[in-house]
Amino acid sequence: MEPLPHPQPPPGTARRRARDLGIVIGSAATGPLNAITDVPGVRVGHTTVRGRPDVHSGVTAVVPDLVSPHTPLPAGVFTGNGYGKLIGTTQLTELGTLETPILLTSTLSAFRVADALVGWVLQRPGCEEVQSLNPVVGECNDGLLSDIRARPVQEEHVRTALDTASGGPVAEGCVGAGAGTVALGFKAGIGTASRTADLAGEGRTVGVLVQANFGGTLRVLGRTLTPRSVGVGADVPVPPADTGSCMIVVATDAPLDARQLTRVARRAVFALARTGAAYSHGSGDYAIAFGTRPDGVPMADAGLGTLFEAVLDAVEEAVLNSLLAATTTTGFGGRTVPALPADLLLAALTSPAGP
């Protein structure tokens, strides 16, 4: 296998994001990087695992600086459709606290990833006496393009993603847990975005990261787009009904409690409908929202409207970024899924007759 920790494209070769194309979702300003790492104290790491032509998989880590079993962060979770394996969800729901980084991976690798996360946390300074912790691991089924039964993600890949997690720009598209995912008829992967909001007179940031792998028909700025309509082929393979999913991670420095963060997570799943999500029987659609201020006084519910809107816009943009950053991929069984080409997307959006 070829492990690739947090790969970044060479200068000048990165694919353009939605805003680079003039596609602006909502009116709120983004953070400096338009990424989940705009939230202070949040880092992201990827390890991409490839064994061409049959393996396109990996792991992505969202790492809040303060999180540990001794310093849990307030968190909430929402299940849009529960056909998935979100490890750690019951305690997260019951207690409203996050004790570990959040890891994303492939379905059949989720259990190994959770075990590796436990081992990594137990070895952290100050955790020598920890006897119980709740690892949080989400997954999407990348079996359309990757040999999922090979379970290629190993402990060393998990540790690399955690140990190399950093602030700054976040690699998107076919990286980490998004290496083999497909969404809305196109090659997808990891996407991220952020928004700033005025809450009770103070500027706050909300950032999202998505692992996009769900069915439906893509909608961008009100236009419905398919591989055929943008000219990249009509015979794109469709994932089986029992595959799919979308994992959404939301981080914010707004002072919110677990109940309020659950409301935030709910809006994140709602936002997938804007992109054309089908929420099918076989799609596991989940959002986890956490706050980076464990001791803040929760703000009033009446002031959350601006934050809810920011989450809706950021998730929509993050999904689009995941598509635009991805590259056409040929994988397991010789199946090929095309990327969403920026030039053809813009042509479709500006066509008076529509696609």
Image (cartoon, rainbow, N blue to C red):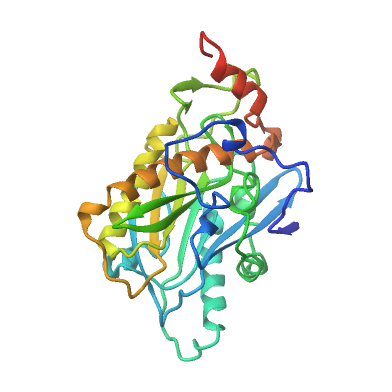
- Using the image, determine if residue 4 lies above or below residue 162: above
Residue 59's spot in the image, x, y percent? 60, 58
Residue 176 placement: quadrant: bottom right
Which residue is drawn at the image coordinates 59% and 39% (left, top)?
Answer: 144
Number of marks in the rendered image: 0
344 with respect to 110 (left or right): right
Which residue is drawn at the image coordinates 42% and 79% (left, top)?
Answer: 69
User: Which one is in front, 321 or 161?
Assistant: 321
Which residue is drawn at the image coordinates 56% and 17% (left, top)?
Answer: 350
- Using the image, determine if residue 217 lies above or below residue 178: above
Residue farthest top in this picture: 353
User: Which one is in front, 102 or 36?
Assistant: 36
Residue 231 placement: quadrant: top right
Residue 340's spot in the image, x, y percent? 62, 30
User: Which one is in front, 57 or 265?
Assistant: 265
Residue 251 visible in the shown view:
yes
20 with respect to 193 (left or right): right
Residue 101's spot in the image, x, y percent? 49, 68
Residue 91's spot in the image, x, y percent? 32, 68
- Using the image, determine if residue 237 lies above or below residue 190: above
Residue 278 visible in the shown view:
no
Which residue is drawn at the image coordinates 28% and 70% (left, top)?
Answer: 95
